[in-house]
Image (cartoon, rainbow, N blue to C red):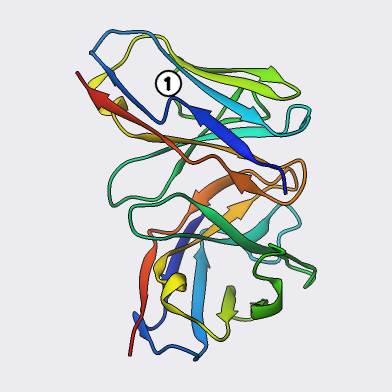
Amino acid sequence: QLQLQESGPGLVKPSETLSLTCTVSGGSISSSSYYWGWIRQPPGKGLEWIGSIYYSGSTYYNPSLKSRVTISVDTSKNQFSLKLSSVTAADTAVYYCASSTSSEYFQHWGQGTLVTVSS
Amino acid sequence: DIQMTQSPSSLSASVGDRVTITCRASQSISSYLNWYQQKPGKAPKLLIYAASSLQSGVPSRFSGSGSGTDFTLTISSLQPEDFATYYCQQSYSTITFGQGTRLEIK
């Protein structure tokens, strides 16, 4: 059973870069069976897909965030990461990492981590 | 982007009731429609994928149907643990979610 765990700062200043890491256990991030994604949820609001990555490094981003997002994978650590640049208060959200199949439904999720953008 | 619209936005029901939640896509998405359940403070949980396939471990009282633009999630007999928020998600093109349907106890 795959398990995912987000980690990173809970507070980021406006205009800076948000950086989060997702550690995968119970399976290999190099598996051809999975894609690895980031989804966020502003407090009291709905879900927004940020982007996904395949173990080969192929990435797929939400066009609305594409100019600010970088997702990368570190197979040696069984981790993948999210960087979101030039953050504003609108980026305050719970950030989830998740695994999906090639059909892009998210089967396994991390518990989520709240990131607040504030000075 | 494909817009996903859920109805109703909120719903009150009683234990044992049959409940149906609807999700409509702004264009045809074939059967690329998935359903999630989210409880407060928790990550979403996959219930249904590909419009009608039940995720392993999910009770059989949950079912999904539809194709094209109109989809439904049905809970045949509500249990106390089913009171939560439900989201649809399309994976036909750039992934988008519905706005959610909050299912409350009457």
At x 77%, y 46%, the residue is B93
Q: As drawn, is B71 to the left or to the right of A63?
A: left
At x 67%, y 49%, the residue is B95
Residue A1 appearing in the image: no
At x 62%, y 21%, the residue is B71
Tell me the subunit letter for badge 1: B
What is the three-letter code of the residue carrying label 1?
A: Pro
Q: As drawn, is B26 to the left or to the right of B22?
A: right
Across and down, in percent, residue A25 comes to 50, 64
Residue A64, compared with residue B3, is above or below; it is below
Q: As drawn, is A54 to the left or to the right of A36?
A: right
Q: Residue furthest left?
A: B106
Across and down, in percent, residue A105 comes to 63, 43
At x 73%, y 51%, the residue is B94
* Crowd band around label 1 with a 10 angstrom C-alpha radius: few (<14), some (14–19), many (20+): few
Give the camera-side residue of B83 and A106. B83
Where, by quadrant of the figure, is residue A58 drawn?
A: bottom right
Across and down, in percent, residue B17 comes to 31, 8
Across and down, in percent, residue B52 comes to 63, 21
Look at the image and tell me in which quarter the C terminus of chain A lies. Answer: bottom left
Q: In the rendered image, which residue does mark 1 sit on?
A: B59
Residue A50 appearing in the image: yes
- Say which element carries label 1: loop
Q: As drawn, is A83 to the left or to the right of B18?
A: right
Give the camera-side residue of B42 and B98. B98
Where, by quadrant of the figure, is residue A93 drawn?
A: bottom left
Numbered label tally: 1
Residue A95, compared with residue B25, is above or below; it is below
